[in-house]
Amino acid sequence: MPMIRVSTNVPDKDIPANFEERLTDLIAESMNKPRNRIAVEIMAGQRITHGASIQVSKLFVLQVESIGALSADDNIRHTQKITKFCQEILKVAQDKVFLNICHLYDGSTFVALLMFQSQ
């Protein structure tokens, strides 16, 4: 079950009402996962800064957790799609979208486990 946690300094009132639904659709398509298995949590209005800058700008930090669909190539694709989505929907600068992608299986990745098992 992919879990997406979005932390942003953007106030909740400025995030479209269908943001979670649209992000769910994007993740389902990008990860090839069933829509009904994806959880999205939005934490809006957070006190977040980048580089301790006093200039307030829109900033998004996304934690993406899943079992599978997180190879190096997959992660590049997911990052590009999510960043573009945030740029288009929320008008956030590309350099203000940060993704932390984490594989949930056994504290490791399938690639690392497969490499270990093949030795």
Image: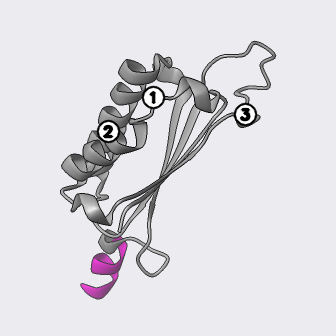
Q: Quadrant of residue 50?
A: top right
Is the C terminus in the top left, top right, bottom left or bottom right quadrant? bottom left
Is 17 on the left or on the right of 61, as rendered?
Answer: left
Residue at 77% in and 19% down: 53
Q: Nearer the viewer, mark 2 or mark 3?
A: 2
Q: Quadrant of residue 71?
A: bottom left
Q: Nearer the viewer, mark 1 or mark 3?
A: 1
Residue type for callout 2 = Arg
The spot of residue 13 in percent (x, y) is 59, 27
Mark 2 or mark 3: whose residue is earlier in sequence: 2
- The residue singled out by tag 3 in the image is 48
Residue type for callout 1 = Pro
Q: Quadrant of residue 3?
A: bottom left
- Kind of element beneath mark 2: helix
Q: Disc number at residue 62?
A: none
Number of on-image labels = 3
Mark 1 or mark 2: whose residue is earlier in sequence: 1
* Distance (Cα) linking label 1 and label 3: 20 Å
Mark 1 or mark 3: whose residue is earlier in sequence: 1
Residue at 29% in and 67% down: 68
The spot of residue 59 in percent (x, y) is 60, 27
- The residue singled out by tag 1 in the image is 16
Tag 2: Cα neighbours inside 10 Å, few (<14), some, or many (≥20)? some
* Distance (Cα) linking label 1 and label 2: 10 Å
- The residue singled out by tag 2 in the image is 22
The spot of residue 80 in percent (x, y) is 32, 33
